Amino acid sequence: MAIVRLVTCFVLYTSLGQIPSSVGVTLRTTDKIVWANEFEPIELTCLIESISTNNPRIEWKKIKNGIPSYVYFQNKIAGDLEQRAQLREPANILIFNATRSDTAEYRCEVAAIDDQRDFDEILISLAVRVKPVVPRCSVPEAVTVGTSTELRCLENEGFPAPQYRWFHNNEELPQDAKNSLKFVNSSYSINPDTGGLKFRRVKKDDAGEYYCQAKNDAGHAQCPPQMMECVCVVVVVVVVVVVVVVVVVVIQLYYDRGNHHEFVSLVKDLARPGEITQSQTFDFEFTHVEKPYESYTGQNVKLRYFLRATVVRRLNDISKEMDIVVHTLSTYPELNSSIKMEVGIEDCLHIEFEYNKSKYHLKDVIVGKIYFLLVRIKIKHMEIDIIKRETTGTGPSVYHENDTIAKYEIMDGAPVRGESIPIRLFLAGYDLTPTMRDINKKFSVRYYLNLVLIDEEERRYFKQQEITLWRKGDVVRKSMSHQAAIASQRFEGSAASESALEQAAKEESGLIGVCVGVAKVTVD
């Protein structure tokens, strides 16, 4: 079996006392704290003020949550910035389209072996501003004069957190009503941090259209205007309505906000056009609902199933959504081979590692062994990591987000030749999802086992291996449709009952199901 060479890199620090800059490498940057707008280019400067070495070694590292990773290594862009950045002379990095995941600290390192002081580094902090999306506004339709009420505005995507402003009939409301002659008699107050607009005592003049604007340094967004009526007496509103319920499956990509990719949408009318003067309840049922994928919420993508009930009215509609969580249950795979590999460094290290299988359910146990066949370096400790890699987009717009789910130390101390180290890692305690590959050609989620050895000089030797995760059904339940199909086959024995059994099997696997519920319309 071929020996895979492990990549190792280390930084040698040498204390040489007071050294003139002319005989040592010296770095400088124009900005140690850099701000950038999302999806716009930004350049991190690493200026070499003095150096004697002709071809110094230049490396860039991204440090996020205290964990470093390479973004420029061995003369090429790597990691999160691959295909999205380039190195510019002398050692600057230009990011073509900054994303929110690029917010981190970046370290520029230059090693010059011919200089007396042969190493220098500089740390730069990058913060990516994110433009607010359309805020969610809540404006009451009708308020009784003399009572109190509150209008709400909320936006969760913008960075830094936006400030909120309210507009009444296309005119901005001052933060302090007492400073404006037009609004000096108004009883409202605005909280620019939370987006709340409170009226202590509503007046007739407070009626009209209201909308909210969320704004930060990256831009602003506002919700559509909504009408608020101020009435003097309590009345029963009688309107012509149509009640509609919809089941929807949608993929939301955070970098492509505003474009939701729906691939399942079923609509059912619950009531004919007419008048609703009192609270009513409408039963509904969706049969043979396809659920091809599992619900998922990640760092850059979200796949959600939800029900939306809508009351269609003449002026504006009333809608309410309820999310549905879908889990895809699987059975034990027929083929589940073990993982065996040899890795090493020539004349320094040669190890064999083995995992008992390549496919694990979410509450499984990873069992394996590591054999040391040759050890000529001083290893301090060894750990195994579980890494989740989320990939979104296609072509040049592909985004990779790596998340270290778990770190598990399996050895502390120097091993000797012939020693065997056991591995036993329980998955039940970690927040994991099944492996998802090319979901509707929008995103993928993969998991890797990362074996890391660290020597006494803090050099790291690592090897990654992909594994497949799947969700196991805890209890086998017979659905009502399955029981009905069995009864039909027992008493009729027809071909139709056989097709009913096949349909019931699909429902139990989670691919097709029945959605039953109740929509209640209340008239106040």
Image (tube, grey):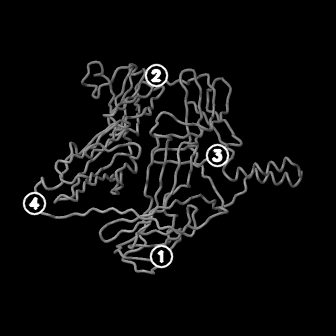
- The amino acid at mark 3 is Lys
Residue 269: % across, % down: 67, 31
SS of the residue at dot 2?
strand
- Could you tell me if the residues under marks 2 and 3 are in contact, i.e. CB atoms within 8 Å? no
Identify the mark at residue 371; answer none if there is no mark. 1
Residue 1 is at least partly visible in this image:
yes
Mark 1 / mark 3, whichever is N-terminal: 3
Q: Nearer the viewer, residue 380 or 340?
A: 340
Mark 2 / mark 3, whichever is N-terminal: 2
Quadrant (top left/top right/bottom left/bottom right) for the C terminus: top right
Mark 3 and mark 4: Cα distance apart in space:
68 Å
Please give left or right for residue 121 compared with residue 21 in the image: right
SS of the residue at dot 3?
loop
Identify the mark at residue 291; answer none if there is no mark. 3
- The amino acid at mark 1 is Tyr
For the residue carrying disc 2, how many other residues have a C-alpha within 10 Å: few (<14), some (14-19), or many (20+)? some
Identify the mark at residue 229; answer none if there is no mark. 2
Please give left or right for residue 476 compared with residue 488 in the image: left
- Could you tell me if the residues under marks 1 and 2 are in contact, i.e. CB atoms within 8 Å? no
Mark 1 / mark 2, whichever is N-terminal: 2
Mark toward the viewer: 2 or 4: 4
Mark 1 and mark 2: Cα distance apart in space:
76 Å
